[in-house]
Image (cartoon, rainbow, N blue to C red):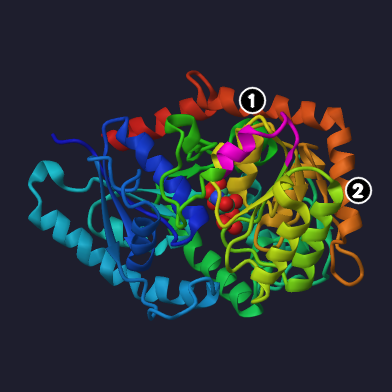
Amino acid sequence: MGRPHALLLPLPAQGHVLPLMELAHRMVSHGFTITFINTHFNHARLLSAMPTLTYNTNPSINFISIPDGLQPGDDRNHVANLCKTLMTIMPLHLEEIIIKMMHKQPEQDKPTCLIADQAMAWAFNVAKKNGLRTAAFWPASAATFTSIRNVPKLIQDGIIHEHDGSAKTPGVIFRLSPEIPPMNVNHLFWNRQLDSESNKVIFHCINTNKESIKNIVEFVVCNSFYEAEKPEFDYLNTSKILPIGPLLSCQRFGKPAGLFWSADTTCKAWLDEQDVNSVIYVAFGSLATVDERQFQELALGLELTGRPFLWVVRPDFTGKAIINLLKGLEDRIGGRGMVVQWSPQQEVLAHPAVSCFMSHCGWNSTMEGVSNGVPFLCWPCFSDQHLNQTYICDVWKIGLKMNPDENNMITKEQIKDKVEELLDDGEMKNRALAMKEIAIKGIEKGGSSFENFNTFISAMQV
Ligand code: UDP
């Protein structure tokens, strides 16, 4: 018998590739060989972001790529377009690869299992057909997972429309169980994509994927931890769903593997010069954008706080005036603030100078802030981010919500006031630190995520 050999297939987006890559590294340390399957487009991005770093240096991880079915200039952030080709074009390429591997490789090198992002559930049929064991990777919260599981109930209870999952009565609050915190129908992630076509396509994918998740996969490994979402995991009530998070690469070797952009590490020296617990860290993940008016207001708000800040401004974060807007800000604030295009976020959040995290509440960012005991200023934009905000602010009580005004703007005055309110609240920081301790204990020997990971590994090894 050779080493177990897992094929890992992420949804081709930053927030999905990153945690799955971390899972790959963890599996290697338990004796697995990994073939990590990116799209051609993302493979090229990863190589250019990390030519010599951690992308391709572990000899037990082999990186290969397949087409995503889009043309070179197509917008890959357009969920509807991407999902359509992922479901129609990629299965053929995946099957071709699996068949080749099964036939050509020596017996002991053949793949033994496939772990694919739950959103790529078509892959489980391909794997099963070719005799591979399967597990799904769920890179978001158990709450979001629970909402998907309950689509039939939500339809039956008259909360959402059957044909497209949209709200029957916008803003309605419902409960899935007495223990699970209330949810707002507007926050269901399939209703919060960037355009209505993408809402419909995501809802369609959920319905299409449901059967293979239920009937084919042996496990769903989830980048959350039991103690963070106890009622949700209890409600799901199955040993098939295993919370193994937080999946943090910083914890293991200080540097995340799988970044699409090269991180500007000069910010670490800048952070070293700042007072402990003083810096506002501002980052909106890999996809969220704001319009130029809101961008300017955010810049003015950060200026108004009078505090040091580290702000991640991706080149595509706002409209074309970005350079001028930033120049104006830099002229006014000098060294008090630092702007980078992409940060080493996990290292930044672990730095003692950071006092709070102004975040779009993507699930990875949420887990990373939680694991470092950093309280949040929540600025959700789309997808599951509003639901994540509910957990951060209303359930765990480790953050404050930013509230758009009647013009849908978050004003500079509100930014200043919320920063003050958050940082004056010692209890908020204490709760964040207590949650950090629980999160870290969970991934250490004997912890809940540690044990779940071992269960998963032992099962997939045989
Ligand atoms: N990230 C980073 N540097 C940045 C901004 C983000 O390394 O400047 C990483 C962050 O640590 C997280 C991921 O990108 O792991 C973003 O995932 P998340 O789920 O938070 O948001 P998404 O990009 O999916 O909206």
Q: What x and y, as percent, mark residue 213?
A: 46, 55
Q: What x and y, as percent, mark residue 374?
A: 70, 35
Q: Is mark 2 within 8 Å of ligand 1?
A: no
Question: Are the residues tagged 2 and 1 within 8 Å (C-beta)?
Answer: no
Is there any visible trace of residue 341 in the rendered image? yes
Q: What x and y, as percent, mark residue 326?
A: 69, 64
* Amino acid type assigned to the residue bearing label 2 in the image: Asp
Does residue 382 appear left or right of residue 60 in this picture?
A: right
Residue at 78% x, 51% y: name it.
Answer: 175
Does residue 88 appear left or right of residue 141 in this picture?
A: left
- For the C terminus, which image quadrant? top left
Whether the magenta-drawn stretch holds residue 12 is answered as no
Q: Give the SS element for disc 2.
A: helix
Looking at the picture, does residue 220 appear above or below residue 441? below
User: Which residue is at the front of the view, 342 or 225?
Assistant: 342
Q: What x and y, as percent, mark residue 352?
A: 66, 29
- For the N terminus, which image quadrant? top left
**Residue pointed to by mark 2:** 417
Residue 141: mark = none
Does residue 255 appear left or right of residue 277 in this picture?
A: left
Is there any visible trace of residue 158 in the rendered image? no
User: Which residue is at the front of the view, 377 or 279?
Assistant: 279
Residue at 53% x, 36% y: name it.
Answer: 245
**Residue pointed to by mark 1:** 438
Q: Give the SS element for disc 1.
A: helix
Number of numbered tags placed on the structure image: 2
Residue at 12% x, 41% y: name it.
Answer: 108
The span from disc 2 to disc 1 (Cα, nearest Å) is 30 Å
Residue 59, by quadrant, is top left
What span is colored magenta in the figure?
Answer: 267-279
* Amino acid type assigned to the residue bearing label 1 in the image: Ile
